[in-house]
Image (tube, grey):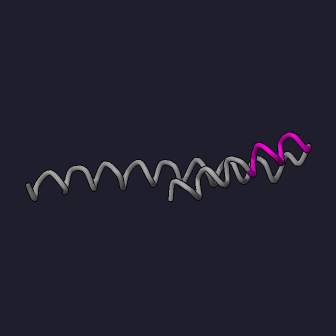
Amino acid sequence: MLRWSVTFLVIALIAGVLGFAGIAASAAGIAKILFFVFIVLFIISLILGKRKV
């Protein structure tokens, strides 16, 4: 999931440099959402992983 977030971030940067503001904003929004979902899932896996030990 982190890979998808980085991919959309790169797409947003390239689109921003080329002047496609709408595509850049959409890709940046998707990247932000995926990054926060990744962080939440990572924290949940850390908490659940410590309970098993």
From the image, which quarter does the C terminus lie in?
Answer: bottom left
Which residue is nearer to you in this view: 8 or 28? 8
Relative image position of residue 24 (x, y in whole percent) = 78, 48
**Residue located at (14% from left, 51% from top):** 50
- Left or right: 52 with respect to 48? left
Relative image position of residue 42 (x, y in whole percent) = 35, 51
Magenta segment: 11-18
Q: Main secondary structure of the magenta part?
A: helix
- Left or right: 31 with respect to 12? left
Relative image position of residue 12 (x, y in whole percent) = 75, 47
- Left or right: 24 with respect to 40? right
How many marks are shown on the rendered structure? 0
Which residue is nearer to you in this view: 15 or 3? 3
**Residue located at (58% from left, 47% from top):** 32
Q: Quadrant of residue 45?
A: bottom left
- Left or right: 46 with respect to 33? left
Identify whether 21 is placed above or below 3: above
**Residue located at (91% from left, 44% from top):** 18
Furthest residue toward left:
53
- Membership of 47 in magenta stretch: no
